[in-house]
Image (cartoon, grey):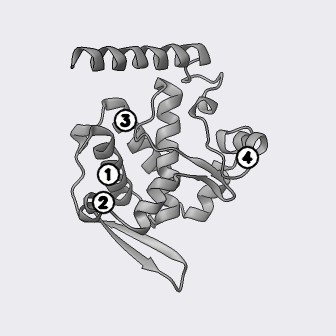
């Protein structure tokens, strides 16, 4: 299993273990905050999920589909219970959290996000992800529903955010390193 996949599964385990009422909607919002907050600081997401501007907020379509039909690695890590009468999905952990797959910064963000939203219901989190001029709102207004949300939209002028120029430079450096690694490994 690659590192990004391990991080995704372990982030899910962490959030399910450290927040209450963690169903599908709450979980995808927690992952969104993790990825976009980390990108804002480093120009890199934690999980590599792609989020889309759906009517009810940012949604990682590929991972949402996995929750509906869990692949083996996800099924081993989680117990996913669909409750059709309530139109909800509850998620419980089967596996233990592996903190070793995360950097210290990623662990701090996991802890902060879980602390902030520990008692929150999914409905309460909707408002926070729909704030004006945030990535979901900007994408919905500029590109319409179901458009991909660009991580660059997480950058701003507030303390803790890298600049657009820094982000572009970091992303370009990563591309060069990947290309170099692929040519030297042949």
Q: Which mark is residue 106?
A: 3
Identify the residue under disc 2.
Answer: 74
Q: Which mark is residue 140?
A: 4
State the CA–CA distance, disc 3 to disc 1: 14 Å
**Label 2 crowd (10 A; few <14 / some 14-19 / many >=20):** many
* Residue at the image position 40 percent from the left and 14 percent from the top: 176
First in sequence: mark 3 vs mark 1: 1
Residue 118 visible in the snapshot: no
Q: Which mark is residue 29?
A: none
First in sequence: mark 4 vs mark 2: 2
Place of residue 138 in the rendered image (x, y in percent of width and height, measured from the top left):
73, 39
Q: Residue furthest bottom?
A: 85
First in sequence: mark 1 vs mark 4: 1
* Residue at the image position 48 percent from the left and 39 percent from the top: 35
Instruction: Give the secondary structure at mark 2.
Output: helix
Front in this rendered view, residue 89 or 172: 172
Place of residue 43 in the rendered image (x, y in percent of width and height, measured from the top left):
49, 25
Mark 1 vs 4: CB contact within 8 A:
no
């Amino acid at each position: 299993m690659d590192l990004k996949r391990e991080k995704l599964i372990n982030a899910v385990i962490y959030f399910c273990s450290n927040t209450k009422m963690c169903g599908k909607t709450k979980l995808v919002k927690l992952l969104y905050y993790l990825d976009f907050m980390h990108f804002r600081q480093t120009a890199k997401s934690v999980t590599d999920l792609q989020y889309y501007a759906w009517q009810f907020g940012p949604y990682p379509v590929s991972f949402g589909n996995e929750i509906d039909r869990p692949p083996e690695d996800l099924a081993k890590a989680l117990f996913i219970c669909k409750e059709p009468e309530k139109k909800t999905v509850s998620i419980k952990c089967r596996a233990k959290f592996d903190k070793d797959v995360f950097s210290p910064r990623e662990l701090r963000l996991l802890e902060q996000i879980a602390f902030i939203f520990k008692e929150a219901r999914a409905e309460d989190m909707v408002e926070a992800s729909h704030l004006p001029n945030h990535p979901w709102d900007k994408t919905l207004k500029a590109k319409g529903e179901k458009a991909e949300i660009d991580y660059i939209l997480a950058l701003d002028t507030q303390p803790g955010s890298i600049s657009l120029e820094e982000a572009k430079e970091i992303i370009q450096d990563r591309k060069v390193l990947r290309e170099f690694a692929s040519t030297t490994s042949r």
